[in-house]
Image (cartoon, rainbow, N blue to C red):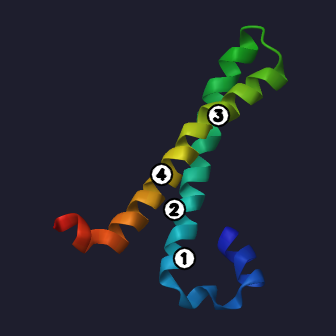
Amino acid sequence: LSELLLSRLRPDIHKDKKLRRCIMLTGAVTLHNIPEGMAISVPLVAGGMKKFKAILLSVLAGVPTVLGAIIGYLLHYYVKNNFSIILQ
């Protein structure tokens, strides 16, 4: 579905295999995060917490995943561009 929507925005998406793989990985992680958020928020609501606060805590629980992805990307970018310097 996401690939279909993106193909409307960017018709040449089918030519770029790396971009297609990134989209598939992003979709898989997104699908994984939905039940993870439910697993966090449902017990909180069942325990008497307000729905808004439970959803907020579920979103905050996903923040380390985003930060880890950003750190991993930056580390990969740094190592990729400075690999010869690192080996010295």
Instruction: State the image quarter where residue 3 is shown.
Output: bottom right
Q: In the displayed structure, does residue 44 sit left or right of residue 62?
A: right
Nearer to us of marks 4 and 3 is 4
Question: Eyeballing the image, is 27 above or below 50?
Answer: below
State the residue at coordinates (52%, 69%): 22
| Horizontal relation, residue 71 to residue 53: left or right | left
The residue sitting at 69% across, 24% down in the picture is 41
Q: Nearer the viewer, mark 4 or mark 2?
A: 4
Measured in 3D between alpha carbons, the distance from the residue under mark 4 to the one under mark 3, in whole angstroms, is 22 Å
Image spot of residue 21 (x, y percent): 49, 72
- The crowding category of the residue bearing disc 3, from other C-alpha atoms within 10 Å (few below 14, some 14 to 19, many at least 20), is some
Identify which amino acid the numbered label 1 is placed on.
Answer: Arg
| Mark 2 Cα-neighbour bin, 10 Å: few <14, some 14–19, many ≥20 | few
Nearest to N terminus: mark 2 or mark 3? 2
Tell me if residue 43 comes above or below residue 70 in the rendering: above
| Residue receiving disc 1 | 20
Element type at mark 3 = helix
Sequence order check: which comes first, mark 1 or mark 4? 1
Q: Which of marks 4 and 3 is nearer the N terminus?
A: 3
Task: Give the spatial CA distance, label 2 vs label 3.
Answer: 18 Å
Name the mark on residue 30.
Answer: none
Element on which disc 4 rests? helix
* Marks 1 and 3, the one that precedes in the sequence: 1
* Residue type at numbered disc 4: Ile
In the rendered image, which quarter is residue 62 located in? Answer: top right
Residue named by callout 2: 25
Query: Dot 2: what SS?
Result: helix
**Taking 8 as reference, is 22 above or below it?**
above
The structure residue drawn at horizontal position 59% and vertical position 87%, both measured from the top left corner, is: 14
Pointers 4 and 2 in contact (C-beta within 8 Å): no
Residue displayed at 77% across by 82% down? 9
